Amino acid sequence: MTPSPVSQSSTSDVIIIGAGAAGLMCAISAAESGKQVQVLDHANKAGKKILISGGGRCNFTNLYTEPSNFISQNPHFCKSALKRYTQWDFISEVDKAGLPWSEKKLGQLFSDKKSEAILNMLLDRCDGLGVHIQLDCSIETIEKTNDEYFVLQTNIAQYSCPSLVVATGAMSFPTMGATDFGHRLAKQFDINVTATTPGLVPFTFDAFEKGRFDGLSGVSMDSDIECNGQSFRENILFTHKGLSGPAVLQISSYWQPGNTVTVNCLPDFDLGESLKEQQKKNPNKHLVSILKNHFPERTIKAFCNPLDVSQPLQNYKHSELEDIANLFQKWHFIPSGTEGYKKAEVTLGGVNTDEVSSKTFESKKVKGLFFIGEVLDVTGHLGGFNFQWAWASGYCCGQAV
């Protein structure tokens, strides 16, 4: 889609800053309500994060979306929008566009025609509704005039509007052009922003753990992972820096520096009891051969080092077998940190939801100023929930502007 040309001075009913998932959905919703809509984005292409999401297949929603799938200082804030624009509403839009999709696992829905199909569906809707999208547009200043209009000075033109929507996302994926612009804008208008940290992000190991698991980069295991009373069951993935994989990304949103993470690398199985049973039945069998039924040899070596697991089972006390089982099923470690915003899928924290209407997304302090999507202090779990938040908040805001 070619960006629409604009004059040196342009006035619209609604200006949306950010041509990502939330911004495009808001533009569609507002234009359907009869509003003249202008979308501005500093990137050279709309929807860059949509394109890379889900490994290029766009995990566009989740069948099991519930408010409990979202993290916020105000857990009630997301309920209204999620109820008014559900996963079924967006699925209906995908179906109407004739785009095939598949459920991968755990309710995660992916586009069969890759991410570009979802983005093109949104851009085509914008085009058909007369939404103007201006790319390569850097905003220099924003002011609110006495006549209640916002005036935006950019590198391309001056824009003005009575309703300004901030859909800029946050700091995750800076290589895609992500910045803290939306948070800085909120602060300019004296709107509180809660503390922000990377979310859905891989952990890094300290020197000891890094040395211990040095040979396991690329190894993936189905695991239970727990921290701060939260737990997730999915794969973990060893990397050359630490630990990643869906379960790790999920739990990272609940982790604080210094917290211990507990991993069970063999869920739904009592390894300690099994080893003691095997000791009774096959006392001459070597312990390592039993462990090989569950783990590759290099994994056993990494977890058990420096313990000797090469002896016959009869040579071990029950307590020793329990200790060895716990190495795999009660592995405790304290991450040295995370890989930061450059690898984070989302930003935790953001514009304080206590200062924004949960129905309209309008600031309670500044009339006509709206915040939607990731810029807010609402963060979804991995698996399509953040896209559903973008669709829901964008749609509801578009109805209100």
Image (tube, rainbow, N blue to C red):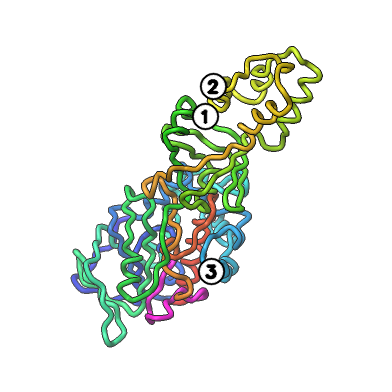
Tag 3 residue = 74
- Mark 3 vs 1, N-terminal side: 3
Q: Which residues are magenta?
A: 357-372
Q: Are marks 2 and 1 in contact (CB under 8 Å)?
A: yes
In the displayed structure image, the side of residue 216 where residue 138 appears, left or right: left
249 and 146: which one is in front? 249
- Mark 3 vs 2, N-terminal side: 3
Q: Residues within 10 Å of mark 3 (few under 14, many from 20)?
A: few
Callout 3, which amino acid? Asn
Q: Quadrant of residue 187?
A: bottom left
How many marks are shown on the rendered structure?
3
Instruction: Provide the secondary structure element on which disc 2 rests.
Output: helix
Residue 53, disc: none
304 and 67: which one is in front? 304
Q: Is residue 363 magenta?
A: yes
In the image, residue 234 above or below residue 138 = above
Could one spot residue 132 in this view of the protein? Answer: no
Q: Residues within 10 Å of mark 1 (few under 14, many from 20)?
A: some
Q: Are marks 3 and 2 in contact (CB under 8 Å)?
A: no
Callout 1, which amino acid? Val
The x and y percentages for residue 51 are: 41, 48
Tag 1 residue = 219
Q: Residue at x 40, y 75 (%)?
A: 35
Indicate which label's residue lies in the foreground, 2 or 1: 2
Callout 2, which amino acid? Arg
